[in-house]
Every structure is written in C-alpha cells, then in structure tokens.
Amino acid sequence: MSSVQIQCTRCKNVFRDRAGRLQDGYSRQCPSCEVVLFFAEDSQHPFIKRAMRNARQARKEMRELQAAKLATPEPEAVQSRRFAGRTRSAARED
Ligand SMILES: [Zn+2]
C-alpha cells in the first residue's frame, strides 16, 4: 500500500499516511503534537495542499501499477525488496 508524507501545520513534524485514506474530508491527529489536521480539496494551507496532491498522484500511480501487474507478473520482487531495506535505514518511516 502506498503512503504519502504529511507535514504537520503546527509542529512541522513529518509523518506518513496511506494515500487511499488521504481524501477530501479526511482528518487525522499529528503523532507528535496531537493537533487534528483536516484534509480538504479547498484547503488554503500549503502543507495540506501538498499532501492532498501527493496522495492523488500516489493513487493514480497505484492504479497504473495494478493495471501493469495484471499484464505482467513481477520477476524483480527480490531485488526491489533489497533496495527498500536500504532506503528505510536512511530515512525513518514513522
Ligand atoms: Zn504536530
């Protein structure tokens, strides 16, 4: 499942949430300062706007990926898993 970065509008903490959930009308608490962030398509806040845009993009890519997966099985699953492990140690994912 694809996730996108969200930056808290209050404490500026960066965390992640699933792209599938990040839609108009969605709200969630910041894990750091516990302020509730509201996600709306007409939000004026640049952090919210960016998160919404990234989520929309990620959902589009997921759809395209699924369409591609139906056409071809994935022969490079082992290789991509090794890369994912390396990037996870560099950038924290919480
Ligand atoms: Zn916060």
Image (cartoon, rainbow, N blue to C red):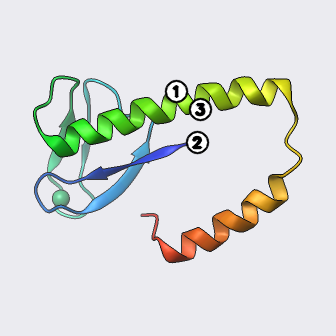
Quadrant of image for the N terminus: top right
Q: Residues within 10 Å of mark 2 (few under 14, many from 20)?
A: few
SS class, disc 2: loop
Give the percent coordinates (x, y) of residue 75: 89, 47
The residue that appears at 30% across and 41% down in the rendered structure is: 51
Please rate how many residues cluster around mark 3, counting C-alpha atoms within 10 Å: few if below 14, some from 14 to 19, many from 20. Answer: some
Q: Residue at horizontal 65%, vertical 63%? A: 84
Residues at marks 3 and 1, CA–CA distance in whole angstroms = 5 Å
Residue 68 sits in which quadrant? top right
Ligand 1 positioned in quadrant: bottom left
Choose top left, top right, bottom left or bottom right for residue 78. Answer: bottom right
Q: Which residue is mark 1?
A: 60
Is residue 14 in sight in this rendering?
Answer: yes
Residue type pointed to by label 1: Lys
Seen in the picture, residue 14 relative to 26 is either above or below; the reply is: below
Residue 80 vertical position relative to residue 41 in the rendered view, above or below: below
- The secondary element bearing badge 1 is classed as helix
Binning the other alpha carbons within 10 Å of mark 1 as few (below 14), some (14 to 19) or many (20 upward) gives few
Q: Of marks 2 and 3, which one's residue comes earlier in the chain? A: 2
Q: Residue type at mark 3: give it.
A: Met
Q: Secondary structure at mark 3?
A: helix
Residue designated by label 3: 62
Q: Do the CB atoms of the residues marked 2 and 3 lie less than 8 Å apart?
A: no
